[in-house]
Amino acid sequence: MSILKINNLSVSYGNKQVIKDLSMNIARNKITAIIGPSGCGKSTLLTSLNLMIEENGGSISGEILFKDKASISYEKADIRRMIGMVFQTPTPFPFSIYKNLTYAPKYYGIKDKKELNRIVEDTLKEVGLYDEIDDLNMLATKLSGGQQQRLCIGRALTVEPEILLLDEPCSALDIRNTENIEKLLLDLSDEYTIVIVTHNLSQAKRISDYTAFILDGELIEYDTTDKVFTNPKDNRTREYIEGIYG
Ligand SMILES: Nc1ncnc2c1ncn2[C@@H]1O[C@H](COP(=O)(O)OP(=O)(O)OP(=O)(O)O)[C@@H](O)[C@H]1O
Ligand SMILES: [Mg+2]
């Protein structure tokens, strides 16, 4: 079942069109990888999905349906809650770990201390940080890079989103931290729909169920990851995964 349906999406910055008439459906509780050379529009596509694109100066035409309802007909705050986003460089707030994880729930109206404590504990367990942290008052920016990124994923989860968008979440991390995040994403995909932009083709192969290949704003190929990597339909996909360009 598709949780997101993207129909004829075009995105422009000024008069430069960056996404060109792109249509694809995103399957619920699966991991979808978006791959393609630098500048092809991956981040633009991702930020279109939670309507952040307009704040980045882009304009959209076409239609994005979230659970069969036009995403623009939802309140922006609701869309941002239901579709969380994690960026390339870990971006914890310069506050304590506790405050990082209670910030959004408080914003959305949860005041009860016990409930907030429960959210913090459950989230730390969910992202595998519970046993690694002994002081919740520690500044989040003092965690290691990998821990910060898991905290940022946790922070997105505190408001119980349905979709998690990740834009190259491992590119600033070493192999061990990357493995931790990949394992985490595989675990989370039982409960959440995950869309991940990655430059790392072996990462896409390892963790994603579906892969979309974008070239110059056009969706060239979209299929099961297995199919895209073993038997692509389009020569341009083959050239990209064989490392000929990008
Ligand atoms: N805010 C913006 N204003 C104007 N042009 C932009 C803006 N953001 C991106 N672009 C342009 O849109 C095109 C697509 O950019 P985008 O960041 O979506 O690519 P990408 O595939 O994510 O690249 P990378 O792999 O390097 O992150 C690029 O030509 C870029 O210069
Ligand atoms: Mg990008």
Image: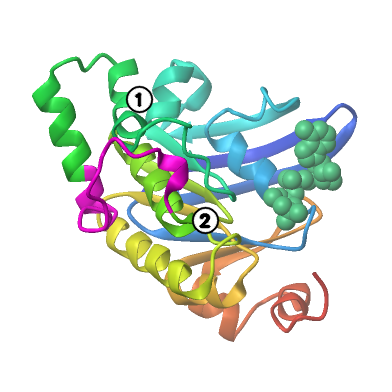
Residue at 29 percent across and 18 percent down: it is 106
Q: CA distance from mark 2 to mark 1?
A: 22 Å
Q: Which is more toward the observer, 235 or 40? A: 40
Q: Are marks 2 and 1 in contact (CB under 8 Å)?
A: no
The magenta span reads 123-143
The residue singled out by tag 1 in the image is 104
Q: Is mark 2 within 8 Å of ligand 2?
A: no
Residue at 48 percent across and 52 percent down: it is 195
Q: Is mark 1 within 8 Å of ligand 2?
A: no
Q: Which is more toward the observer, 118 or 34? A: 118
Q: Does the magenta run of residues contain 164?
A: no
Residue 24 percent across, percent down from the top left: 56, 50
Residue 69 percent across, percent down from the top left: 42, 27
Number of numbered discs overlaid on the protein picture: 2
Residue at 43 percent across and 19 percent down: it is 77
Q: Which quadrant of the frame does ligand 1 lie within?
A: top right
The kind of residue tagged 1 is: Ala
Residue at 20 percent across and 58 percent down: it is 131
- Disc 2 vs disc 1: which is toward the camera? 1
Quadrant of the image occupied by residue 29: bottom left
Q: Which is more toward the observer, 24 or 171? A: 171
The kind of residue tagged 2 is: Ile
Q: Does the magenta run of residues contain 126?
A: yes
Query: Above or below — where is 116 with respect to 155?
Result: above
Left or right? Give the position of 201 relative to 163. Answer: right
Residue 196 bears which disc, if any? 2
Q: Is residue 208 visible?
A: no
Q: Which is more toward the observer, 244 or 156? A: 156
